[in-house]
Image: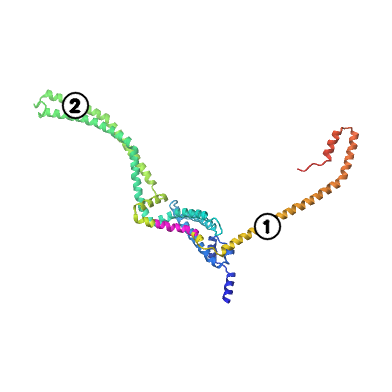
Amino acid sequence: MQESVGSFSQRENYVPSVFTRLLWWLATAEEQLLKDCTVDRNRYSIIGLTVMGTWLFATLAWTYFFTTVVSNIFLAAILGIFMGGIILGIDRALIKGIDKYNKNRFWPFVFRGLLAMTIGLFMAQPALLYLFNKEVKQQISLDNEQRKRDKRKQQDTLYAAQKKELEVRKQNLQQQLTTKYNEVSAARSSFIAETDGTGGTGKVGVAAVAAAKKKEYEKLDQEYQQLNTQIQPQIRSVDSSINAIETSIQQEEKAFTELLNDGFLTRIEALNNLIKSNAALQYRYYLLVVILLLIELMPVIAKSLLPAGVYDEKVRLRQQLEGEIANNNHSKELQLKELYNQLAFEQDEELIRSFFNITQEHRKQKVEQELKAWKESGDSFDKFWLRIKKDLLTKQEH
């Protein structure tokens, strides 16, 4: 019997610690109602711990996410704490709306579940990037090399027609020089063969034939030199254009290489490519996604699975009590206002009647004076009546 009294006394004087108050606040519980509910204290402390875990996880995940976006670690931490606070507010709103006395629980629960899953799936990405950081960096290197090759192919395709046109032009110019050079070479060989007797007439030193072949050779050589003088600048111009195209391609490749980074989207793409190419990673990846998703869903799951207790009944009764008090207060305030208006009407009515009674004799005297003045003035009755209405008659209130 003494133990029961002691237990009851301890419940009466229970003072939660600061940490317990924090857990209750995270669980959206009312301290004044909960501290007397022995069983529900631990239940809502558990819910508060799940909310705290989700809050800390969200803060760390968002901080890591912002480190991939900004270079300042302190700014990333501030932004991570800010977004973690937003997630905390959403989680508290979700679990606050879960009530066993709500008749329509299915669709609100589905909505809360979908919202929690959406947030959880997004927050799982930074965590997975952190866990597979080394593998992702390696995949980023491979992906960036592939991007460079793709960029080179795009550039080659873009300038292919222009380069082909320049190369064909250069080939035609070189073909003209080659053809002319072959003619000069043939003439020179014919002249030399005629001179040494190895060709032509076969007679050494025949001056007339050799002179003619020499003249032909010199003529062709001169034409070749003139043609070479004309064509070489054109060839150099074509080479310069081709080099300019190559330089432009290299500059664009350099600019594209400088744009390559290891930002968030690049890491996500690398992670996806890594999962596609690595069968051993796929199972662990999806398992981690489920685990990280459960972290975000835990507050909703905990609030939904844990049975309702005395605290929930006290909350319902308290709400009912406050509603009845609010209705009673409203009714009494309405009665007071009606009473005030009624008494004010009665007092104003009495005052107005007294005012007209007091001023009645004075108004009669005023009429007699006006009547006497009218008789003496000789004005028309209409003018007299207008003056009476203006000075003595009352106006209706609007």
Amino acid type at mark 2: Glu
Verify whether residue 291 appears in magenta.
yes
Task: Please state, as top left, top right, bottom left or bottom right, where the C terminus lies in the image.
Answer: top right
Q: Residue 153 has which mark? A: none
Q: Circle 2 sits in a helix, a strand or a loop, which is it?
A: helix
Q: Residue 218 has which mark? A: 2
Contact, mark 2 vs mark 1 (Cβ under 8 Å): no
Residue 4, quarter of picture = bottom right
User: In the rendering, at what x and y percent does residue 120 appear?
Assistant: 46, 55
Q: Does 279 sit above or below residue 18?
A: above
Residue 171 horizontal side relative to residue 10, left or right: left
Q: Residue 329 has which mark? A: 1
Crowding near pointer 2: few (<14 within 10 Å), some, many (20+)? some
Q: Circle 1 sits in a helix, a strand or a loop, which is it?
A: helix
Mark nearer the N terminus (2 vs 1): 2
Q: Does 128 sit above or below residue 42?
A: above
Question: Nearest the camera: 162 or 214?
Answer: 162
Verify whether residue 66 appears in magenta.
no
Crowding near pointer 1: few (<14 within 10 Å), some, many (20+)? few
Residue 39 horizontal side relative to residue 204, left or right: right
Q: Which residue lies furthest to the top in this view?
A: 208
Q: Give the range drawn in magenta.
A: 286-300
Amino acid type at mark 1: Asn
